[in-house]
Image (tube, rainbow, N blue to C red):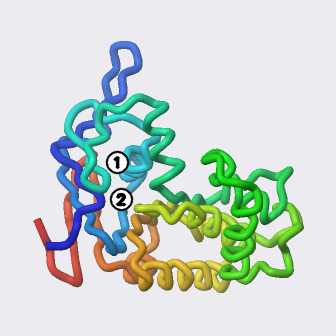
Amino acid sequence: MSEPIVELKSAVKEYVNGSLRVTALRGIDLRIDRGEYAVIMGASGSGKSTLLNLLGCLDHLTSGNYLLGGEDISNLTDDELSEIRSRRLGFIFQSYNLIPQLNVLENIEVPLFYQGIPESAARVTAERLAKRMGLSSRLRHKPMELSGGQQQRVAIARSLVCDPLLMLADEPTGNLDSKTGHEILELIDELHAEGKTIVMVTHDDDIAHRAQRVVRFMDGEIISNVWNGEAKA
Protein backbone atom coordinates (compact mmCIF):
# COMPACT_ATOMS: atom_id res chain seq x y z
CA MET A 1 0.00 0.00 0.00
CA SER A 2 1.13 3.54 -0.76
CA GLU A 3 1.49 6.03 2.07
CA PRO A 4 -1.62 8.22 2.47
CA ILE A 5 -0.88 11.94 2.45
CA VAL A 6 -4.52 13.06 2.72
CA GLU A 7 -7.23 11.15 4.56
CA LEU A 8 -10.66 12.68 5.06
CA LYS A 9 -13.01 10.58 7.14
CA SER A 10 -16.73 11.42 7.33
CA ALA A 11 -15.79 15.05 6.69
CA VAL A 12 -18.61 17.54 7.22
CA LYS A 13 -18.40 21.30 6.74
CA GLU A 14 -21.32 23.55 7.61
CA TYR A 15 -21.61 27.32 7.45
CA VAL A 16 -24.08 29.10 9.74
CA ASN A 17 -25.41 32.61 9.11
CA GLY A 18 -28.05 33.47 11.66
CA SER A 19 -30.79 30.89 11.29
CA LEU A 20 -29.46 29.73 7.92
CA ARG A 21 -27.32 26.60 7.91
CA VAL A 22 -25.56 25.52 4.69
CA THR A 23 -23.87 22.14 4.43
CA ALA A 24 -20.93 22.45 2.01
CA LEU A 25 -19.50 18.94 2.55
CA ARG A 26 -21.73 16.02 3.50
CA GLY A 27 -19.66 13.39 5.26
CA ILE A 28 -17.14 12.66 2.53
CA ASP A 29 -14.33 10.12 2.62
CA LEU A 30 -11.27 10.79 0.48
CA ARG A 31 -7.72 9.47 0.40
CA ILE A 32 -4.81 10.85 -1.63
CA ASP A 33 -1.59 8.82 -1.56
CA ARG A 34 1.98 10.07 -1.80
CA GLY A 35 2.88 10.96 -5.37
CA GLU A 36 -0.70 11.16 -6.65
CA TYR A 37 -1.94 13.85 -9.00
CA ALA A 38 -5.66 14.33 -8.39
CA VAL A 39 -8.06 16.83 -9.93
CA ILE A 40 -11.18 18.07 -8.16
CA MET A 41 -14.11 19.11 -10.37
CA GLY A 42 -17.67 20.26 -9.91
CA ALA A 43 -20.08 23.10 -10.57
CA SER A 44 -20.08 26.30 -8.54
CA GLY A 45 -21.32 25.52 -5.05
CA SER A 46 -20.52 21.81 -5.34
CA GLY A 47 -18.02 21.84 -2.47
CA LYS A 48 -14.72 21.73 -4.34
CA SER A 49 -13.49 25.12 -3.09
CA THR A 50 -14.51 24.23 0.46
CA LEU A 51 -12.53 21.02 0.11
CA LEU A 52 -9.43 22.89 -1.07
CA ASN A 53 -9.68 25.33 1.85
CA LEU A 54 -9.89 22.44 4.29
CA LEU A 55 -6.98 20.57 2.71
CA GLY A 56 -4.99 23.80 2.82
CA CYS A 57 -5.67 24.28 6.55
CA LEU A 58 -7.51 27.53 5.78
CA ASP A 59 -10.70 26.32 7.44
CA HIS A 60 -11.90 23.83 10.07
CA LEU A 61 -14.13 20.78 9.67
CA THR A 62 -17.48 20.90 11.45
CA SER A 63 -17.13 17.18 12.15
CA GLY A 64 -15.08 14.25 10.92
CA ASN A 65 -11.32 13.92 10.64
CA TYR A 66 -8.53 15.23 8.43
CA LEU A 67 -5.21 13.39 8.55
CA LEU A 68 -2.27 15.03 6.77
CA GLY A 69 0.77 12.79 6.43
CA GLY A 70 -0.72 10.49 9.06
CA GLU A 71 -1.25 13.27 11.63
CA ASP A 72 -4.82 14.08 12.66
CA ILE A 73 -5.01 17.87 12.38
CA SER A 74 -8.81 18.15 12.71
CA ASN A 75 -8.76 19.96 16.06
CA LEU A 76 -5.65 22.09 15.84
CA THR A 77 -5.73 25.79 16.67
CA ASP A 78 -5.45 28.46 13.98
CA ASP A 79 -1.83 29.10 14.98
CA GLU A 80 -1.01 25.40 14.71
CA LEU A 81 -2.68 25.21 11.30
CA SER A 82 -0.72 28.27 10.19
CA GLU A 83 2.50 26.47 11.10
CA ILE A 84 1.45 23.44 9.05
CA ARG A 85 0.60 25.68 6.06
CA SER A 86 4.03 27.27 6.13
CA ARG A 87 6.00 24.04 6.47
CA ARG A 88 4.02 21.24 4.83
CA LEU A 89 1.84 22.80 2.12
CA GLY A 90 2.50 24.57 -1.16
CA PHE A 91 -0.13 26.77 -2.82
CA ILE A 92 -0.58 27.81 -6.46
CA PHE A 93 -3.42 30.29 -7.04
CA GLN A 94 -5.17 31.52 -10.17
CA SER A 95 -4.30 35.12 -9.25
CA TYR A 96 -0.68 34.26 -8.26
CA ASN A 97 -0.92 36.05 -4.87
CA LEU A 98 2.52 37.60 -5.15
CA ILE A 99 3.56 40.56 -3.01
CA PRO A 100 3.77 43.53 -5.42
CA GLN A 101 6.47 45.39 -3.47
CA LEU A 102 8.87 42.43 -3.59
CA ASN A 103 10.96 41.20 -6.50
CA VAL A 104 11.07 37.63 -7.81
CA LEU A 105 13.69 36.36 -5.37
CA GLU A 106 12.08 38.06 -2.40
CA ASN A 107 8.66 36.61 -3.23
CA ILE A 108 10.12 33.11 -3.42
CA GLU A 109 11.92 33.63 -0.11
CA VAL A 110 8.83 34.72 1.87
CA PRO A 111 7.94 31.27 3.33
CA LEU A 112 11.56 30.78 4.43
CA PHE A 113 11.58 34.17 6.16
CA TYR A 114 8.65 33.11 8.34
CA GLN A 115 10.54 29.95 9.27
CA GLY A 116 13.56 31.89 10.40
CA ILE A 117 15.87 30.50 7.71
CA PRO A 118 19.08 32.59 7.45
CA GLU A 119 18.95 35.10 4.60
CA SER A 120 21.99 33.64 2.83
CA ALA A 121 20.53 30.13 2.80
CA ALA A 122 17.13 31.41 1.70
CA ARG A 123 18.74 33.30 -1.18
CA VAL A 124 20.56 30.20 -2.43
CA THR A 125 17.31 28.20 -2.41
CA ALA A 126 15.35 31.00 -4.11
CA GLU A 127 17.95 31.42 -6.85
CA ARG A 128 17.97 27.67 -7.51
CA LEU A 129 14.20 27.52 -7.85
CA ALA A 130 14.03 30.69 -9.95
CA LYS A 131 16.53 29.15 -12.34
CA ARG A 132 14.49 25.94 -12.40
CA MET A 133 11.45 27.99 -13.44
CA GLY A 134 13.33 29.79 -16.22
CA LEU A 135 13.44 33.12 -14.38
CA SER A 136 17.19 33.71 -14.18
CA SER A 137 16.93 36.97 -16.14
CA ARG A 138 14.04 38.28 -14.03
CA LEU A 139 15.35 37.91 -10.48
CA ARG A 140 15.14 41.63 -9.61
CA HIS A 141 11.85 42.28 -11.39
CA LYS A 142 8.66 42.94 -9.44
CA PRO A 143 5.37 41.20 -10.29
CA MET A 144 3.98 44.07 -12.38
CA GLU A 145 7.06 43.85 -14.58
CA LEU A 146 6.37 40.19 -15.39
CA SER A 147 3.97 38.44 -17.72
CA GLY A 148 1.18 36.31 -16.27
CA GLY A 149 3.10 33.14 -17.06
CA GLN A 150 6.22 34.47 -15.37
CA GLN A 151 4.22 35.44 -12.30
CA GLN A 152 2.79 31.95 -12.09
CA ARG A 153 6.30 30.50 -12.36
CA VAL A 154 7.30 32.65 -9.38
CA ALA A 155 4.27 31.33 -7.51
CA ILE A 156 5.22 27.74 -8.31
CA ALA A 157 8.79 28.36 -7.14
CA ARG A 158 7.44 29.86 -3.91
CA SER A 159 5.19 26.82 -3.41
CA LEU A 160 8.24 24.53 -3.68
CA VAL A 161 10.59 26.47 -1.42
CA CYS A 162 9.76 24.43 1.71
CA ASP A 163 9.64 21.08 -0.11
CA PRO A 164 5.93 20.63 0.71
CA LEU A 165 4.25 17.37 1.58
CA LEU A 166 1.21 18.41 -0.48
CA MET A 167 0.79 20.93 -3.31
CA LEU A 168 -2.61 22.56 -3.82
CA ALA A 169 -3.47 24.35 -7.06
CA ASP A 170 -6.63 26.41 -7.60
CA GLU A 171 -7.33 26.98 -11.31
CA PRO A 172 -3.62 27.71 -11.90
CA THR A 173 -4.07 28.49 -15.61
CA GLY A 174 -7.32 30.43 -15.27
CA ASN A 175 -5.73 33.83 -16.03
CA LEU A 176 -3.39 32.61 -18.78
CA ASP A 177 -3.67 32.21 -22.54
CA SER A 178 -3.75 28.66 -23.86
CA LYS A 179 -0.05 28.51 -24.85
CA THR A 180 1.20 29.87 -21.53
CA GLY A 181 -1.28 27.73 -19.63
CA HIS A 182 0.02 24.65 -21.41
CA GLU A 183 3.58 25.53 -20.37
CA ILE A 184 2.50 25.86 -16.73
CA LEU A 185 0.70 22.52 -16.87
CA GLU A 186 3.84 20.91 -18.26
CA LEU A 187 5.77 22.26 -15.27
CA ILE A 188 3.18 20.75 -12.94
CA ASP A 189 3.45 17.45 -14.85
CA GLU A 190 7.21 17.52 -14.26
CA LEU A 191 6.73 18.09 -10.53
CA HIS A 192 4.36 15.14 -10.38
CA ALA A 193 6.85 12.98 -12.28
CA GLU A 194 9.42 13.89 -9.61
CA GLY A 195 7.12 12.54 -6.91
CA LYS A 196 5.16 15.57 -5.74
CA THR A 197 1.63 14.98 -4.43
CA ILE A 198 -0.71 17.41 -6.19
CA VAL A 199 -4.39 18.25 -5.77
CA MET A 200 -5.79 20.69 -8.32
CA VAL A 201 -9.21 22.30 -8.65
CA THR A 202 -10.23 22.96 -12.25
CA HIS A 203 -13.32 23.23 -14.43
CA ASP A 204 -11.39 22.23 -17.58
CA ASP A 205 -11.80 18.64 -18.76
CA ASP A 206 -8.65 18.89 -20.90
CA ILE A 207 -6.64 19.70 -17.77
CA ALA A 208 -8.33 16.90 -15.85
CA HIS A 209 -7.13 14.38 -18.43
CA ARG A 210 -3.53 15.11 -17.41
CA ALA A 211 -4.13 13.88 -13.85
CA GLN A 212 -4.15 10.32 -12.54
CA ARG A 213 -7.49 10.70 -10.83
CA VAL A 214 -10.57 12.90 -11.21
CA VAL A 215 -12.86 13.40 -8.22
CA ARG A 216 -16.20 15.06 -9.08
CA PHE A 217 -18.37 16.84 -6.52
CA MET A 218 -22.05 17.71 -6.53
CA ASP A 219 -23.99 19.27 -3.67
CA GLY A 220 -21.21 18.56 -1.19
CA GLU A 221 -20.81 14.91 -2.07
CA ILE A 222 -18.39 12.90 -4.20
CA ILE A 223 -20.36 11.59 -7.17
CA SER A 224 -17.46 9.97 -9.00
CA ASN A 225 -13.89 9.04 -8.22
CA VAL A 226 -12.17 7.86 -11.37
CA TRP A 227 -8.61 6.51 -11.56
CA ASN A 228 -7.20 5.55 -14.95
CA GLY A 229 -10.71 5.17 -16.31
CA GLU A 230 -12.00 2.96 -13.50
CA ALA A 231 -14.23 4.10 -10.65
CA LYS A 232 -12.75 3.49 -7.20
CA ALA A 233 -14.35 3.53 -3.78
Q: Please indicate whether residue 124 sits to the left or right of residue 203 in the image.
A: right
Quick one: label 2, few (<14), some, or many (20+) residues within 10 Å?
A: many
Residue at the (55%, 61%) spot, across then down: 162
- Report the front residue among 191 and 95: 191
Q: Position of residue 111 (x, y in %)?
A: 63, 52
Q: Please indicate whether residue 42 sits to the left or right of residue 227 in the image.
A: right
Quarter occupied by the N terminus: bottom left
Residue at mark 1: 47
Residues under numbered marks 2 and 1 in contact, where contact means CB atoms less than 8 Å apart: yes
Circle 1 SS class: loop
Work out whether 87 lies above or below 134.
Answer: above
Tell me how far mark 2 sits from mark 1, CA to CA. 8 Å
Amino acid type, mark 1: Gly
Q: Position of residue 211 (x, y in %)?
A: 37, 78
Work out whether 40 lies above or below 73.
Answer: below
Quarter occupied by the C terminus: bottom left
